[in-house]
Amino acid sequence: MSTAPSEPLFEGGGHRRALTIKRYPRARSFRLHVDPRDGRVLLSMPQRGSTAKARKWAESQRVWIEERLAQLPRPQPIVADASSPYRGRDIRVDWSEHYRRKPALDADRLQLGGPEEAIARRVLVWLKEEARRTLTEETEYYARHAGVDVARVSIGDPRSRWGSCASTGNIRYSWRLVMAPPDVLSAAVAHEVAHRVHMDHSRQFHALVADIFGRDPAPERAWLRDNGAALYWVGCSS
């Protein structure tokens, strides 16, 4: 597979994105996709196809592309007095040069000091630390309930999944789960812990997820489908 940035530019809903062309050996036609997590406009095409034809075809789809851009979640920059999602609710970034540098949550206010230009970095570090702590605790809880061992819990920022479980017993999560409602995070953890027993998505696997979570987590899965993309726009300015 090869990748090459290209023109034209597309605009919609305050978003401005260039076209990115990806060649795939098995592709038989042109296909367009606007990634809801970052707004990238992606065009897949056959390995030996004409780039000029691909650009021309994408241009013919301009209305469709710009409609999709207009439907993207709004960027949520992390600045003083702005709000940020945390555990399913909005908390206010309460910055003052008189506060301590390390963020501290006080009810629905996240207080922090230090240089104002470092607000976003400090808040993101705090969110990731909270994610690591919360996801580790939840994993240990559900692992005990399922009667399994987990070798290691880690966090990252994957683009295609909220969690993954390796055959070694290592479980890795998206740190962005800490911004979702608590039950959504818990359902994601129960899902990955159940993979310690069933490394598939069989009927037995889903039954185990429901057992250790306490019920069918269908509402939580639906929440992620409907709202998960917006979590990738936290900390973005455009």
Image (cartoon, helix red, strand yellow):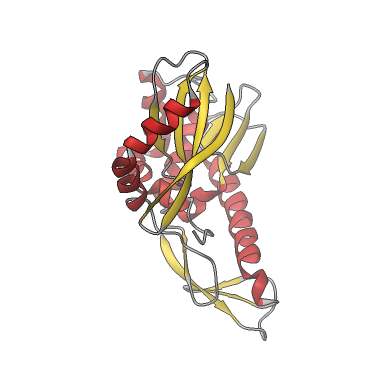
The structure residue drawn at horizontal position 43% and vertical position 35%, both measured from the top left corner, is 212
Describe residue 126's horizontal placement relative to residue 198 as left or right: right
Q: Is residue 103 above or below residue 129?
A: below
Question: What residue occupies the far bottom of the structure in this picture?
Answer: 98
Q: Is residue 132 above or below residue 113?
A: above
Of 158 and 205, which appears nearest the observer?
158
The structure residue drawn at horizontal position 42% and vertical position 26%, both measured from the top left corner, is 53
Q: Is residue 74 above or below residue 66?
A: below
**Dividing the image into 4 quarters, which one contains the N terminus?**
top right
Q: Residue 143's quadrant in the figure?
A: top right
Of 14 and 171, which appears nearest the observer?
14
Count of numbered circles in the view:
0
Q: Is residue 215 visible?
A: no
Describe residue 91's horizontal placement relative to residue 151 as left or right: left
Q: How far from the left and from the top, in percent, is residue 24? A: 51, 19
Q: How far from the left and from the top, in percent, is residue 159? A: 52, 39
Q: How far from the left and from the top, in percent, is residue 121? A: 65, 63
The structure residue drawn at horizontal position 60% and vertical position 45%, both measured from the top left corner, is 136
Q: Is residue 193 visible?
A: yes
Of 75 and 109, which appears nearest the observer?
75
Q: How far from the left and from the top, in percent, is residue 40? A: 47, 43
The structure residue drawn at horizontal position 70% and vertical position 74%, both measured from the top left corner, is 101
